[in-house]
Image (spheres, rainbow, N blue to C red):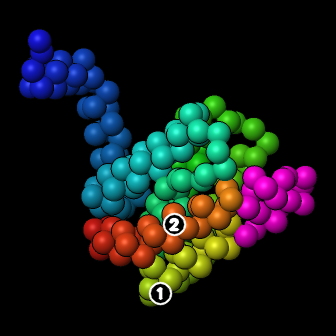
Amino acid sequence: METGRQKTYRFLSKHFAKIAMAAALVIIASLIFGAPIKTIILAAILIAVASASTFYFNYVSAPINFELVKLSTILMAYTHGMAAGLAVGITSTLLGKILIGRIDEKLPISAAAISVIAILAALFPTADIATLGIALTAIYNISLLALSLATGGQLSWNLPYEGTNFIINLILFTRIAPFIANLL
């Protein structure tokens, strides 16, 4: 039976070139954008976590909307500005849709909506992150609920879907976002 150390060594040996390439890309991005390496790494982590958070859609068919895209986008825009927020929001939205296999007509709407949220978050860098996050999440959820209903969506599905997303983000922004914002 293989030990944890052996598994780690095998994994690193197998993926060393990819890891080295990723590290080089982080350094290059840092130089091109003039951002600290820490910021680039944290943005990459936020993108990865936000994208992966949508993966449960492949297994759950209930109208529950748990995702970390809004949290990641708002945090990055709030702490590092509009460009960083847009990069995290659009990239994690696109990667999340790819992970769940839903590249569809809703992708441009999702990308546009998260872009608006990133821009708004960047406009209020001195606001309380919890209040800002809750307000922007509410704007996002209400807007998408209205848009969905206007285009023939079912209230019985969309209301719990957007409602659970708001409640989850309310908890995330009041309990976790202040801590993460201090790390960024």
Q: Position of residue 58 (x, y in %)?
A: 58, 33
Q: Looking at the figure, which quarter contains the N terminus?
A: top left
Q: Where 58 sits versus 81, above or below? A: above
Q: Which residue lies under the disc numbered 2? A: 169
Was residue 168 drawn as part of the magenta stretch in this picture?
no
Label 1–label 2 contact, CB within 8 A: no
Q: Nearer the viewer, residue 27 or 104?
A: 104
How crowded is the residue under tag 2: few (<14 C-alpha within 10 Å), some, or many (20+)?
A: many
Q: Position of residue 162 (x, y in %)?
A: 67, 61
Q: Which residue lies under the disc numbered 1? A: 127
How crowded is the residue under tag 1: few (<14 C-alpha within 10 Å), some, or many (20+)?
A: few
- Please report the residue visible at 71 percent of the width from the left and 46 percent of the height from the top: 107
- Please report the residue visible at 33 percent of the width from the left and 36 percent of the height from the top: 22
Please give left or right for residue 18 compared with residue 97 in the image: left
Residue 37 — which label?
A: none
Identify the magenta region.
Answer: 142-159
**Mark 1 or 2 closer to N-term?**
1
Name the amino acid type tagged 2.
Asn
- Please report the residue visible at 68 percent of the width from the left and 73 percent of the height from the top: 139
Q: Looking at the figure, which quarter contains the C terminus?
A: bottom left
Was residue 153 drawn as part of the magenta stretch in this picture?
yes
Q: Position of residue 59 (x, y in %)?
A: 56, 34
Q: Quadrant of residue 102?
A: top right
- Please report the residue visible at 33 percent of the width from the left and 56 percent of the height from the top: 42
Point out the frontmost of discs 1 and 2.
Answer: 2
Circle 2 SS class: helix
